Amino acid sequence: MKRRNTVAVITAQVESTYQKQLMKGILGEGFAHDIDVVVFSTFVKDGVWETYHLGECNIYNLIQYDKFDGIIIVPDSIRMEGKLEELVETVKKCFHGPIVSLDYPLEGVYTAQHDTNAGIGVIVSHLVNQHGISDIAFMTGTKGHPHAQARLQAFLKSMREHQLPILKNRQFYGDFWYNKGEEVVDMLVHCPEGMPEAIACGSDTMALSVYDACVKRNIRVPQDIIITGYDANEDGTDRPFFVTSVIKDSVTVGKNAMMHICNSLGIDTEEEAVSKPHLFTGKTCGCEEKNKVLDFAEAKAEIKLAERESKDFYSGYNFMMEDCIGATDLTEYLWKLDYYTRLLTDMEAFHICLCDDWRGDGKDDTSFRKSGYSNEIKWIYDKKRGRNIKNTEGFVDLNRTFEKEEILPIIWEERKKPAVFYITPLHFMDRCFGYTVLEYENRQITYDRIFRDWMRNAGNAFESMRRQMNLMDINEELEEMYHLMEMNAVTDSLTGLFNRNGFNIYAPRMLEQAVEEKQNIFVMLADVNNLKGINDTFGHTEGDFAIKTAAAAIRVNTAMPFSVDEKCFRIGGDEFAIISIGDFSKVQINKRIDDIKNYLVNFNEISGKKYEVMISIGTNLGSPVGVNIDNILQIADQKMYAEKQWHTHMYKSEVVKDL
């Protein structure tokens, strides 16, 4: 039974600066009201490689909606085509508590958002008041996108407030990326009014594309034209803090989202605050030297910290991938992963959960889990800093399991302080292995890109281990099949004894073995008496029965006492051979012959058959040195033939039993 309220956050690429700021607000407000937070996040936002992104987005199928008291979703971070719509539909259908959308309007859902009017207004006011500019072009994002429409409307509103002219040929749609700057600058160069004094853009990436297009045409920035952006952060562009831009107050937006959840649950909070965007002046407006207070100083400090932390992970001496792929079994691999968690400097607790079918079908590599998770989950690894189990902070257990509905049992356990759990996918392309969980107690923290890349290594190594384990299973199965084929090739199907092919293979080997081990070799030859008469009189089915009965008598004892090795063969239609290695006496040999014949005497007495099964036997015991198998067989064959002749003579003088 969980003790405190728990809120799920559904997002992507939570390690980005924008997401970190949102999470700071969400966690700060949540922890203040003793609320646990469970974050379901992918490591990528865009479906650049659809197969890989399918494996990422599967993490959303793990959400157990009845476990949560509120849900916060960051729609604009989930950009794989069709995934957002599918996810929102599922959330609305499966969850009946408070839902908050962050900075992106969803029908029927409360939205906590940035003050776009204020953000764009800061830029326009700076251009007008600081630079005396009145002719401003504006490039917003993709046509139809809520953010693009909101930023365009905010620009028009701010222009009206400053009583500046609004021209249609000064308004453009872009793509929130680097692809449209050339097109926009080209249109401005050739428009009747010529180039404007400034181009304001709805994102830093678009601003950089405009800057590059101007440089290409020898249009100087900022001397000839000023360029501004929006959404300033270090991971939004390839040249962070270069463009004069606006830093959005994402912390307040995250805080407001959690406030709404709290109020819906009957928890009293402060009134929701208004987000306050801040201007960041870069090189593209010429005010960089005047920017004495860097509003993004905290983010820059995070960059420097990440650079220090990455020295170990991204150094040429990090052999995590090679070391993990070199593991010979899953247990060894997990302990190697445990060693490399030292590279995750901020990690407090870490858990690996596998689907029970994570290896897929070893015989059909196209058959594997792509969507959802198995009902039974294997909790194979957990680690908590400062906890010592078996002289290590890590703990490996391949047999510990729980039901998928629990997600991870410790989430619902009682603890003194609230915590955040980051749940991320463990996969290779679209092949689902399971998921991992990072746990932080009462800390407003998100993982960084080191963890993202660390997990890429882990997923690739899991795929290597899966292939290795499946290949080992296939090899074992092939060995069994080969052994079966080998046995079939040397085994007589009627009697189960070795056949003539088996005799040709094993007899010379046994002779060599006897020489090497300095043992005598014993050979017994046997032949069924009057088999032709049984076949002619009673049919071949009865003849086969007589052969099987003789074979049973031959192997009545598995081996003579003191035998090092012994094998029984059917070397012809009704001919049998026994080869045995050891130090035997004549008494033991005679007892073996008596045992065989007594077996048949007893059989004949109770069989009810109208014929008797009898055999002739010849033996030879001697040294294997200086002889071949034919030499040894020859003496035994002569003795058997003599006994056979006697039985043939006796048969001719008698009448078949009961006829």
Image (cartoon, grey):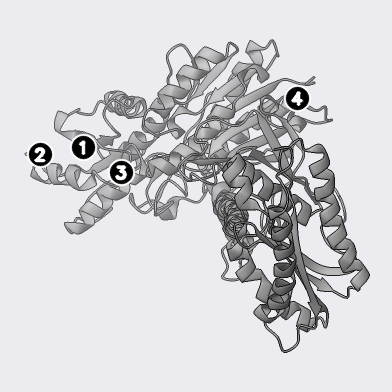
**In the displayed image of the protein, which residue is found farthest to the left?**
192
Residue 305, position in %: x, y? 61, 56
**In the displayed image of the protein, which residue is found farthest to the front?**
653
Q: Determine which residue is flagged by label 2.
A: 193
Instruction: Report the Cα–Cα distance between label 4 and label 2.
Output: 59 Å
Label 1 secondary element? loop
Reading the chain from its start, which is encountered first: label 4 or label 2? 4
Camera-near label (3 vs 4) is 4
Label 3 secondary element? helix
Q: Amino acid at mark 4?
A: Asp
Q: Determine which residue is flagged by label 3.
A: 206
Residue closer to the observer: 141 or 545: 545
Q: Determine which residue is flagged by label 4.
A: 34
One can see residue 301 in this view: no
Label 4 secondary element? loop
In the picture, measured across the screen, residue 223 lies left or right of residue 653, that is left
Residue 467, position in %: x, y? 55, 53
Residue 650, position in %: x, y? 74, 57
Q: Are marks 2 and 1 in contact (CB under 8 Å)?
A: yes
Q: Amino acid at mark 2?
A: Glu
Residue 222, position in %: x, y? 28, 53
Crowdedness near tag 2: few (<14), some (14–19) or many (≥20) residues, C-alpha within 10 Å = few
